[in-house]
Image (spheres, helix red, strand yellow):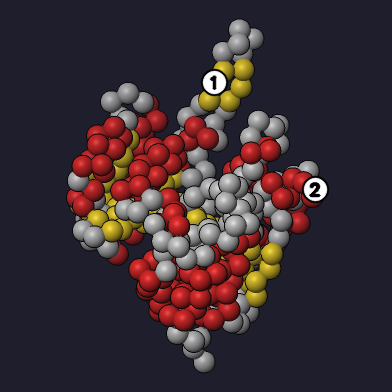
């Protein structure tokens, strides 16, 4: 039996997680779903956004399904929910963050390196008051994310754009060199280098030109949100964070929206699309993943939530999803 650790998170997190679990009970009722505290809720309960028990459960799971975290109460605190998120990514070594974005003629996938770069480099404060954050990459980190991106491009339309800032940064020059070394093993994939500032402009003006984009952590963080905005907004954007062999983390990219928590109007589309990524990448159930994606499109059309200009509640949106899903296979 496959075991899924569910992290309900904060704000609207428990509401959208409940919809995700309803969908899973229909599509794959044999899955074992376990809830564990994480984020602000875990800080209140244990003083730690990633309690040891939660981390051990995640390590032993077949996949981790995570709802959004965050609470204004902890924005300036020494211990913050986001620290738990960074630790969980590092502990599971989920180095490849997949951010699909599609709408109309646009169908692209951003592959973001997730456990290196400036978010994980040395940081501190010098005696003179200077604060520093260091961007660091080892060639092996670049090689493994590049290989993942080449494999994904090979399974799509065979085009890979490698994004860097090689005209300024040494880490980007390393990035570009390693990507081209790996490219020799993928002669069927067309590789293009693009500077990150130009990539942002091209995403905003002609996003249909892209197939797969691979880039480092901070660039990927920014560009993937831009791509989401171009294709419907963060409320619709899912993500998958994958490693080599261990459990992946599947989560919507939007925040916990504490201003609407408990009002029953949260849009669960991104959470459900993250479930679809989990079904596909972690559970090898592409048919169920496609069925869920189709059901989400139906609900977006027939029962849009207020953030999309509609009036459907979270439960009404979920009811349309459930009605559109096939029953589980024998």
Compared to residue 287, the image places residue 228 above or below, namely above
35 on left or right of 177: right
Mark 2 and mark 1: span between their CA atoms? 31 Å
Few, some or many residues within 10 Å of mark 2 (<14, 14–19, 20+): some
Compared to residue 70, the image places residue 117 above or below, namely above
Q: Residue at x 28, y 25 (%)?
A: 167
The disc placed on residue 82 is: none
Compared to residue 202, the image places residue 124 above or below, namely above
| In the foreground, 130 or 274 | 274
Residue at far front of view: 311
Closer to the N terminus: mark 2 or mark 1? Answer: 2
Q: Secondary structure at mark 2?
A: helix
Q: How many marks?
A: 2
Could one spot residue 87 in this view of the protein? no
Q: Quadrant of residue 202?
A: top left
Q: Residue at x 32, y 30 (%)?
A: 165
| In the foreground, 122 or 324 | 324
Q: Residue at x 67, y 48 (%)?
A: 39
- Quadrant showing the N terminus: bottom right
Identify the residue position indicated by label 2 in the image.
Answer: 46
Identify the residue position indicated by label 1 in the image.
Answer: 132
Few, some or many residues within 10 Å of mark 1 (<14, 14–19, 20+): few
Q: Quadrant of residue 159?
A: bottom left
Residue at far top of view: 128
Could one spot residue 311 in this view of the protein? yes
Q: Position of residue 170 (x, y in %)?
A: 37, 26
């Amino acid at each position: 039996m496959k075991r899924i650790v569910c992290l309900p998170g904060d704000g609207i997190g428990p509401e959208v997680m409940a919809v995700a679990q309803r969908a899973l009970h229909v599509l794959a009722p044999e899955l074992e779903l376990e809830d564990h505290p994480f984020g602000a809720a875990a800080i209140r309960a244990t003083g730690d956004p990633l309690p040891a028990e939660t981390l051990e459960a995640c390590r032993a799971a077949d996949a981790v399904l995570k709802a959004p975290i965050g609470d204004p109460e902890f924005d300036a605190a020494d211990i913050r929910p986001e620290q738990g998120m960074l630790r969980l990514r590092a502990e599971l070594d989920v180095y490849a963050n997949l951010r699909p974005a599609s709408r109309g003629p646009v169908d692209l996938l951003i592959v973001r390196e997730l456990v290196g770069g400036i978010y994980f480099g040395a940081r501190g404060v010098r005696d003179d008051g200077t604060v520093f954050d260091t961007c660091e990459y080892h060639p092996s980190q670049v090689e493994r994310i590049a290989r993942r991106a080449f494999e994904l491009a090979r399974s799509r339309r065979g085009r890979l754009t490698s994004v860097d800032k090689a005209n300024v940064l040494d880490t980007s020059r390393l990035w570009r060199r390693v990507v081209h070394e790996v490219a020799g093993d993928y002669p069927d994939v067309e590789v293009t280098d693009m500077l990150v500032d130009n990539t942002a402009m091209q995403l905003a003006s002609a996003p249909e030109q892209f197939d797969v984009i691979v880039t480092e952590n901070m660039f990927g963080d920014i560009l993937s949100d831009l791509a989401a905005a171009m294709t419907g907004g963060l409320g619709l954007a899912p993500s998958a964070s994958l490693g080599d062999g261990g459990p992946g983390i599947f989560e919507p990219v939007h925040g916990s929206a504490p201003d609407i928590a408990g009002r029953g109007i949260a849009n669960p589309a991104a959470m459900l699309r993250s479930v679809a990524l989990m079904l596909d990448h972690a559970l090898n159930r592409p048919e169920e993943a496609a069925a869920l994606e189709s059901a989400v499109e139906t609900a977006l059309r027939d029962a849009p939530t207020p953030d999309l200009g509609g009036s459907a509640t979270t439960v009404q949106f979920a009811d349309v999803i459930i009605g559109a899903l096939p029953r589980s296979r024998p």
